[in-house]
């Protein structure tokens, strides 16, 4: 699996504070933790995010991202979902508080075992990004993870 991990990695441009990484520059502990946690993951793209390592990958035709410490501890991960997969409470809050906005993108974020939903909302030329708990409560203290 590590051979697949190394062979399938590709690099893309990113922000100046982020640094694309070749697979051989990612600590073995990080790669081992990824493979152990996401056994069916493919198509890896690595970035250095300050002291941590972020990887984008696909699993079962779904786009994922995960953030690891240099020692291999997973800090959080996220994956794409459709708007219809959002909890009813989340959809209700969006409908009530963001009238005329449409859901452009939705993701599940798992941070320290707690599940959040981050949603891109669009209306005309305006865009809002919100993070909500499963009960629909906005989570202003949780940063939106790009």
Image (cartoon, rainbow, N blue to C red):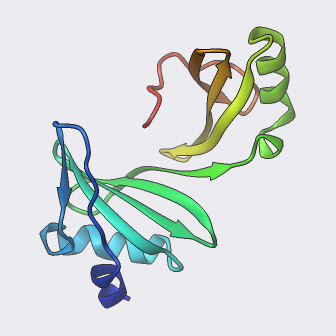
The residue that appears at 50% across and 72% down in the rendered structure is 38
Q: Nearer the viewer, residue 107 or 68?
A: 107
Q: Nearer the viewer, residue 70 or 78?
A: 78
Where is residue 107? Give x, y as percent.
Answer: 61, 43
The vertical placement of 86 against 124, above or below, is below
Whether residue 132 is situated above or below residue 117 in the rendered picture: above
Looking at the rendered image, the quarter that the C terminus falls into is top left
Location of residue 133 (image quadrant): top right
Spot occupied by residue 69 in the image (x, y as percentages of width and height): 25, 53
Q: On the image, which quarter does residue 132 sit in?
A: top right
Q: Is residue 73 left or right of residue 112?
A: left
Give the quarter of the figure containing the N terminus.
Answer: bottom left
In the picture provided, is 69 more to the left or to the right than 124? Answer: left
For the point 26% across and 62% down, which residue is it? 11
Q: Residue at x 18, y 68 (%)?
A: 22
Q: Quadrant of residue 49?
A: top left
* Residue 76 at x, y percent in the picture: 44, 48
Q: Residue at x 30, y 90 (%)?
A: 3
How many numbered marks, from 0 up? Answer: 0
Q: Is residue 14 above or below residue 90?
A: below
């Amino acid at each position: 699996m590590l051979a697949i991990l190394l062979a399938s990695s590709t690099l893309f441009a990113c922000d100046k504070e982020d640094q694309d990484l070749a697979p051989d520059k990612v600590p073995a502990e990080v790669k081992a933790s990824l493979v152990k946690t996401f056994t069916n993951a493919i198509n890896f793209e690595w970035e250095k995010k300050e002291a941590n390592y972020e990887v984008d990958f696909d699993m079962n035709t779904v786009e994922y991202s995960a953030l690891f410490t240099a020692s291999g501890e997973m800090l959080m991960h996220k994956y794409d979902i459709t708007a219809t997969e959002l909890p009813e409470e989340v959809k209700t809050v969006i409908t009530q508080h963001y009238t005329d906005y449409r859901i452009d993108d939705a993701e599940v974020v798992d941070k320290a075992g707690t599940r959040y939903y981050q949603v891109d909302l669009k209306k005309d030329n305006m865009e809002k990004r919100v993070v909500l708990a499963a009960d629909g409560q906005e989570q202003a203290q949780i940063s939106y993870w790009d």
